[in-house]
Each structure stands twice: as C-alpha cells, then as structure tokens.
Amino acid sequence: SSTLIRYLSWVYPLFLALDHLNHMGRKQTNPVGQMFFVYCSTTNISRCQVLNCSYLVMKGRHSKTLEKHVELRHPEEYSKLLKEKEKINSSESSDEKCSTEKRYKIGPLDKIVNVTPKSLHIRMDKNILIKACTELVTNNGRPLSIFKDSGMKKILGPITNFSINPQNIRMHIIDESEYIVNQIKKEIINRPLSLKMDCVTRLDRSLIGINIQYQ
C-alpha cells in the first residue's frame, strides 16, 4: 500500500501539470472561467467569485458545467457572459475567413484550379427538424444551450427560414409533454391504478418521477 501511495503522490501532480499545459495550449472560446471563477489546480476545484453565491465550490473547470452554474444562479452575469461569447465568436469567424482566403491564395496551382463550393440538398420540413432538435434534448441528453453554440447555428442557419433557439425548443418540449400527459389522462380515466413515486437529485437539480401502472 505504501508503494501505491508513493506512486499516486508522483503521478497525480504530473497529471495535473499535463492537464494545465493542455489547457494552456488550447484556445479558450468560453470565457466563463476567467470571468467568474478562480481555479485551484492542486484541489481541482473552481470557486465562484460572484458576490453572495450560495454554491461557491465546483469540482473541475469544464466550461459547460461552469456556464450552467452561472445560467441557473446568476442571470445578470449570464447575460454578460453571452455578450462576451458573441464577441469571441465573431472575432473567430473573422479570423477563420481571413485564414481560409489566405490558404486559397497560397500555392502554384491557385491560377489553374478553381475551387467551387458544393451544396448539400436534403429533404426535410419544419416539423422533422424541430422533432430532431427536441430529440437531442429529451433522448440524447444534450442541454438546451447547444442551440446557442456557433457550430449548431452554422448547421441550422442555411436550412431554416425560422428561428431555432433554446426558448422555442423548450416551449415545444412543454407542449409535447402536455399532450402526452393528456393522452395518459384519457387512458386511465375510471380505471384502478397504482402509483410509484421517487425523488432524485442530480447536477444541482431535484427531480420527482411518477410511475403509473394500470390495466
């Protein structure tokens, strides 16, 4: 056991150092950690710096986790974060465009080869697209914030003439859930049934589950 302890005491700091170098080399596109948190590499803990926060300490420094904390607990700071992310994304798009244009201009074949953009043609209507977006959240467990991501906007933007965002997808999920609840009500009316209820807390959220059995 003493050998294992010595091994872990040597490996763990090395792992933290490599993780730190990895984050240094990676270009940060989400400023949430720099804006609202202080990270301690020794304990792998991020501490919220927003005044009077009731949930100060968080494990790790994953941007999505930190952003979710700010969104749920600090609405004003979350608005500031969204504005800052928009600035970063617009700056990245501009840099990417300049880099692409520069890459196309470099090389001896640029006067011979014509680069023609290709388009994809798919069969999809509004209902199919909204159901697919809903499935991302309900079945695949993706957060509603995925529809704010720049990559998702680039995918949805060219194929939609209407807005898809976390708000209208949330409303669609609520409408669908109400429809399902009403269908269940119609099926169990005037029938004997048994109820099973359970509670669970996950990711700072309290959930209640109700299981209905009937003949």
Image (cartoon, grey):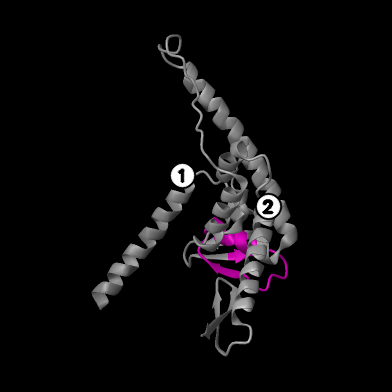
Residue 33, position in %: x, y? Answer: 59, 56
Asked whether 63 falls inside the magenta stretch, the response is: yes
Q: Quadrant of the N terminus?
A: bottom left
Name the side, left or right, on which 44 lies relative to 164: left
Which amino acid, mark 2? Leu
Magenta region: 47-70
Q: SS for tag 2?
A: helix
Tell us which disc is closer to us: 1 or 2: 2
Q: Is residue 30 visible?
A: no
Q: Nearer the viewer, residue 2 or 25?
A: 25
Q: Residue at x 47, y 19 (%)?
A: 115
In the figure, 122 relative to 39: above or below?
above
Q: Nearer the viewer, residue 214 or 53?
A: 214
Q: Residue at x 56, y 68 (%)?
A: 58
Give how far apart the Cα atoms at labels 1 and 2 are: 22 Å
Q: Which mark is residue 57?
A: none
Which circle's residue, 1 or 2, is located before the other in the chain? 1
Q: Which mark is residue 25?
A: 1
Asked whether 161 falls inside the magenta stretch, the response is: no
**Label 2 crowding class (10 Å Cα cut-off): few <14, some 14-19, many 20+?**
many
Q: Which mark is residue 81?
A: 2
Which image quadrant for residue 36? bottom right
In contact (CB < 8 Å): disc 1 and disc 2? no
Name the side, left or right, on which 17 lies relative to 129: left
Q: SS for tag 1?
A: helix
In the figure, 202 relative to 138: above or below?
below
Residue 205, position in %: x, y? Answer: 60, 73
Residue 170, position in %: x, y? Answer: 66, 60
Q: Residue at x 42, y 15 (%)?
A: 107
In the figure, 150 relative to 176: above or below?
above
